[in-house]
Image: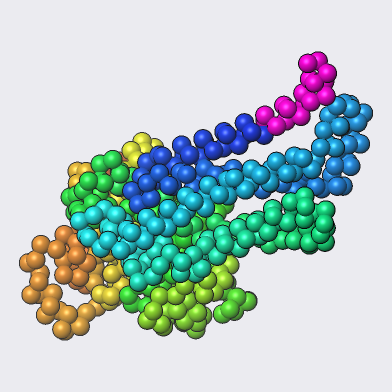
Amino acid sequence: MGNFAANEGLSVFVILVWLGINAYLFVRFYMAFLVEKWFYTRVLLGQALPWARAPAACLNFNCMLILLPVCRNLLSFLRGSIQCCSRTAARQLDRNLTFHKLVAYMIAFHTAVHIVAHLFNFEYFMNAQLNRNSSLLTFVLSEIGNGDNASFLNPIRTNETSQTIVMFTTIAGLTGVVITLALILIITSSMEVIRRSYFEVFWYIHHLFVIFFIGLVFHGYGRIVRGQTSASLETNKPDVCADQFEEWGNNGSGCAVPEFAGNPPMVVMHPSKTLELQMKRKGFHMEVGQYVFIQCPSVSRLEWHPFTLTSAPEEDYFSAHIRIVGDWTQALYEACGGDKTEPQEAWKMPKIAIDGPFGTASEDVFRYEVVMLVGAGIGVTPFASILKSVWYKRIQNNQDVFTKKIYFYWLCPETEAFEWFADLLQSLEGQMTEKGMTDFLSYNIYLTRWKEKEAAHFRVHHEAENDPITGLKQKTLYGKPNWDNEFTNIASKHPGTKVGVFLCGPPQLGKSLEKQCLSHSEADVKFIFNKENF
């Protein structure tokens, strides 16, 4: 027994540690997919979801190890370094091929489990899409992602397809087939009878490991399996909302339509020739009101243009809204497929380079107890980020929010421009009414120009519960604000406070507001003017 421990003890210890890590990863990732974030995914896939993801984690670990035992230069270096300290440890390096084979067997085992689980997953995805019954939660979840600004949960987007077609037309499916075939060829050609009789076959087929690892790198790129985003979990808690799926998105339901991680549409087209660029936040950190410089090499390699970020720091992507008003923006609009009727695939989109983010005056918005936000036209973009962030902070009960009151003014010359931003305001209005927070945000929307036909339509529907232009309960005002009255009212309501006035708009409006700030700042009320500058 003593001789066995001396000769084989370290080998047994290494094997046990390796098996223990595999067991830990399997259990850890199996349990990780039983949490609330993956509830709706499990509604579609059941227990096949964790059974597919747990072996995937073990595969990543073992694929990292598989090449180390056959790196001859590394082994020579380690043998020379360890020899002076422990002959027993150095001797373990001579068993490198045995460990290499054990890791290969483990890869084959987890691959089999992973494939079988995903075969069930594709069957469940297909069944959910085929059973087109709107009274079933599985069908409702499968329909998510059909809109312009949503990430899908079910990767099978139509019932006029099959699992085989999806397998060979998605990145995950195609790379999965390639790396599985490569693995089968590598393992079968490694059998002793083939290796000894046809060494060249073994040697050359083993070089398929290059294709195997390339496929492995891109296998998860399409993110077919998706979980609910952290932000969405705040507005749609599965334990509460799963049984109320028929009311999702309705005012007063308390349950928004769930949103899922993955690759959101890179480009979303809005009315009034405005496009929204959405990009994943990988190592990108931002604050409200910041801006970035954007370059599109396919349009121009020299031009960089500044655009305000319209997403909130709490969201898992960052976005910018771009109004089409010049040659460069028109070229970008066409490059992104804005002039086409059918939606564009993500891989057809042009490359976008980002420089930033950079700070602006709007970053200071939460340092004021009372805030006035004034946007003109597309100048509303920095306030989209601010209003989203304020909402996230409120629903998360963030006690560090110093701001107690926001007055929001938006001046717009055409009705179409309201549409993309009105969705956000409608959501804020509904949620704040539900939570009894209607006093927190006061918003005034002004239409500064209109046509005669539009005026007749406005008169007819003026008495409707919701505004005929924005769909909000707060009616749209016509003309321009009387800033003197606005500043006087705010000063009377908030004595003894500093009011932050933030503008993103034309210079003429900036001069007018700056004069109002100076004339209405008195001993007990101070108006501090801040303007966006690029």
Q: How is the image coloured?
A: rainbow
Q: How many marks?
A: 0
x and y, in percent, of residue 161 in the image: 39, 70
x and y, in percent, of residue 228 in the image: 39, 49
x and y, in percent, of residue 79 in the image: 88, 36
Query: Based on the displayed image, in which of its 4 quarters is residue 378 positioned?
Result: bottom left
Q: Is residue 422 visible?
A: yes
Compare residues 408 and 303 and report the one nearer the observer.
303
Compare residues 209 and 427 and report the one nearer the observer.
209
Q: Assess whether residue 6 is covered by the magenta stretch.
A: yes
Instruction: Say left or right for 215 vs 264.
Output: right
Compare residues 515 and 141 and report the one nearer the observer.
141
Considering the image in quadrants, where does the N terminus appear? top right
Instruction: Say left or right for 225 vs 1.
Output: left
Q: Assess whether residue 510 is covered by the magenta stretch.
A: no
Q: Residue at left 47%, top 53%?
A: 118
Which SS type dominates the magenta stretch?
A: helix
Magenta residues? 1-17
x and y, in percent, of residue 424 in the image: 30, 59
Taking 292 as reference, is 440 above or below it?
above
Q: Is residue 513 visible?
A: no
Compare residues 295 and 205 and report the one nearer the observer.
205
Q: Residue at left 42%, top 79%?
A: 338
Instruction: Say left or right for 411 vs 225.
Output: left
Q: Residue at left 38%, top 50%?
A: 45
Query: Based on the displayed image, in which of its 4 quarters is residue 3 positioned?
Result: top right
Taking 397 as reference, is 317 above or below it?
below
Q: Residue at left 69%, top 55%?
A: 188
